[in-house]
Image (spheres, rainbow, N blue to C red):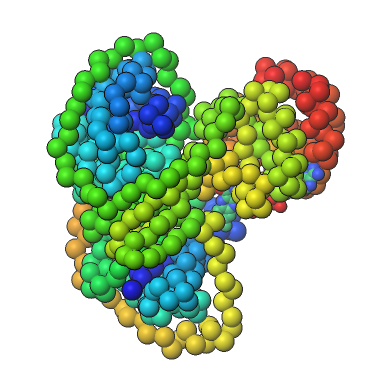
Amino acid sequence: MKALVPIKRVVDYNVRIRVKGDGTGVDLNGVKMSVNPFDEIANEAALKLKEAGVISEVVVVTIGTAKAEDQLRSELARGADRGIHVVTDEEIQPLQAARILAELVKRENADVVIAGKQAIDDDNNQTPQMLATLLDWPQATFASDIKIDGGKATVQREIDAGAETLEVDLPAVISADLRLNEPRFIKLPDIMKAKRKPLDKVELSEFDIDVPKLEVVSTSNPPAREPGRMVKSVEELVAALKDKGLV
Amino acid sequence: MAKILIVAETLGGELHPTTGKAVACAAQIGGEIDIAVFTEAKGAAADAAAKLDGVSKVLQVSNAENGAIRAATLAPQVVALAEGYTHILAANTTTGKDIMPRVAALLGVPQVTDIMAVHGEREFDRPIYAGNAVNRVKAPGDFTLVGTVRTASFGNVAESGSAAVEDASVSADLPAHTRLVGQETGGGDRPDLQTAAKVVSGGRGVGSAENFSVIFSLADKIGAGCGASRAAVDSGFVPNDMQVGQTGKIIAPDLYVAVGISGAIQHLAGIKDAGTIVAINTDENAPIFEVADLGLVGDLFKVCPELEAAL
Ligand SMILES: Cc1cc2nc3c(=O)[nH]c(=O)nc-3n(C[C@H](O)[C@H](O)[C@H](O)COP(=O)(O)OP(=O)(O)OC[C@H]3O[C@@H](n4cnc5c(N)ncnc54)[C@H](O)[C@@H]3O)c2cc1C
Ligand SMILES: Cc1cc2nc3c(=O)[nH]c(=O)nc-3n(C[C@H](O)[C@H](O)[C@H](O)COP(=O)(O)OP(=O)(O)OC[C@H]3O[C@@H](n4cnc5c(N)ncnc54)[C@H](O)[C@@H]3O)c2cc1C
């Protein structure tokens, strides 16, 4: 069974981002970039299934600039077998990413896609669902547990009301939530080894991504909150809350 | 003029209050607003939807498949109703997030996730980077606008309406590849987190599942919903449906009380729109105090019972 794991290069989750003064986006100059945390979890899930003998090959894919190779290499170091890099400087929106991934799934004959549930930069939470739709596959989003057996995946999902368990026929797209696992640390020797793992570069022009797109008009800071104040005692807190009519 | 179809959110055959938030957003876009309700049995949910102010018509789609809400079986039914609508919206809940990209992909259009403000029929604000920046996005052309609505950004609508309820049947091939095995919903008697006017949340500082009774007790005293940080959920103090933040629930209560929560950006992402934020923490340098309207440095095990007694 072959797994495809799409990973995205994003601003590291610890970075406090800065909106550019002219409103043209977020300043990414010199900012630390990492693998989207949910994608690390997705890859870890695939690797665990490989160790359990369920999956035979884990292929990591990224769509992004030349520099996204760093993130692909780090997931190869974590243990993935092979990488595919669709190289582009273009802004790729989720429906386009899903189209590219759908084409790669067909080329690779993958049986399961394990993706992150959302990328922490654009927070769209769309690509895996769109990919499943384009392939006419089932989806199990926000997974907190995955079992694969007999051509089926049984997935526990995190939902607003609690948790639910879905059973989907394979092939399927699964998207990873935070509590699915804790990704293993990447060891130095594995980083060296990953440099020799196969990594295909693919041109964006090989894909048909001609779909309607959204335009970003401008990027701005969220409305700032009024500065607050410290209170010294419970009495003072209660008085302030009463003052605001909150209790 | 816009003609908007809202995909209702239901839980156990009842209308979920977040549906009203999507109606509030649609009202700002303007035009005709219809709600599609997908349930197994006719009745409660559609009737509740018909009461939401501003709604013209409720389309009630009842069939056995809708006994279990799944994206793969719901999306084709939504698309079967889509003809003639300029917009299809749902609340940005885990259900909306699951279904709507599937609707968009079936229609071959992009989706606007998490609409937080309306600037016209096809121009919206949406948060990026966990709400630390806001993108104003525009949908050029006239393709069907598919979007999800940030529930924290819109108020509730009144329930004095009386829209017509129409039975609608859809002819769509529904796939058999996805089965709901079971659901565990916490719920309980406390107010729903996403629509509660007051919320008390506990973090890692609470220390254990048993200690969380301090939080529950305070919440019950003021009629608040209960939330938690990711650390509290990951440590097994409380179930995942209580998580507030970038990857949990984004909420906007009038009052948010953060107890033993440090204030990581991912947590703050969930409470940016709260009215008044109160923080109780032993560490005077905790980042939560930078956003709190009212901060109190102190031990939660002393402060919370005192606060409860004083209220
Ligand atoms: C050069 C460049 C410039 C960009 N400029 C902008 C810009 O100006 N404004 C803007 O809003 N966005 C910009 N983007 C981001 C782009 O729009 C997003 O990649 C796309 O919208 C996907 O949205 P998301 O990441 O929120 O997807 P989500 O749907 O949240 O992603 C979910 C999952 O899908 C998979 N996935 C998503 N994208 C990729 C990918 N590229 N490669 C592999 N797997 C993926 C991952 O597993 C991920 O966890 C730019 C991207 C690039 C590469
Ligand atoms: C991709 C990603 C997504 C994430 N999404 C979320 C999310 O949705 N929601 C979320 O919450 N987090 C999220 N996180 C985790 C986040 O980064 C923090 O780790 C988490 O919020 C910390 O929880 P906490 O404040 O309870 O714990 P800590 O940071 O450990 O803080 C505990 C606090 O309790 C205080 N304390 C201890 N004892 C007492 C006492 N007796 N009385 C009073 N105060 C006391 C301490 O001073 C401290 O400030 C995410 C992280 C990542 C990487």
What x and y, as percent, mark residue B218? 72, 29
Query: Which image quadrant is residue A176 in?
Result: bottom left
* For residue B271, above or below residue A215: above
The residue located at (14%, 37%) in the rendering is B171
Q: Position of residue A31 (x, y in %)?
A: 54, 64
Instruction: Examine the rendered structure and indicate whether residue A150 appears above or below residue B298.
Output: below
Report x, y in % for residue B290: 70, 42
The answer to whether residue B277 is left or right of residue A158 is: right
The image quarter containing residue A231 is: top right
Please tell me in which quadrant of the rendered image residue B201 appears.
top right
Who's the residue at 35% across and 24% down the image? B45
Closest to the observer: B160 or B221?
B221
| Residue appearing at x 51%, y 59% in the figure | A180
Q: Nearer the viewer, residue A151 or A231?
A: A151
Q: From what the image shows, is residue A3 above or below residue B255? A: below
Q: Kindly tell me whether residue A100 is visible in this rendering.
A: no
Q: Residue at x 47, y 66 (%)?
A: A45
Query: Quadrant location of the N terminus of chain B?
Result: top left
Residue B259 x, y percent position in the rendering: 72, 39
Query: Depth check: A31 or A4 in front?
Result: A4
Point out the image quarter for the C terminus of chain B: top right
Q: Is residue B182 visible?
A: yes
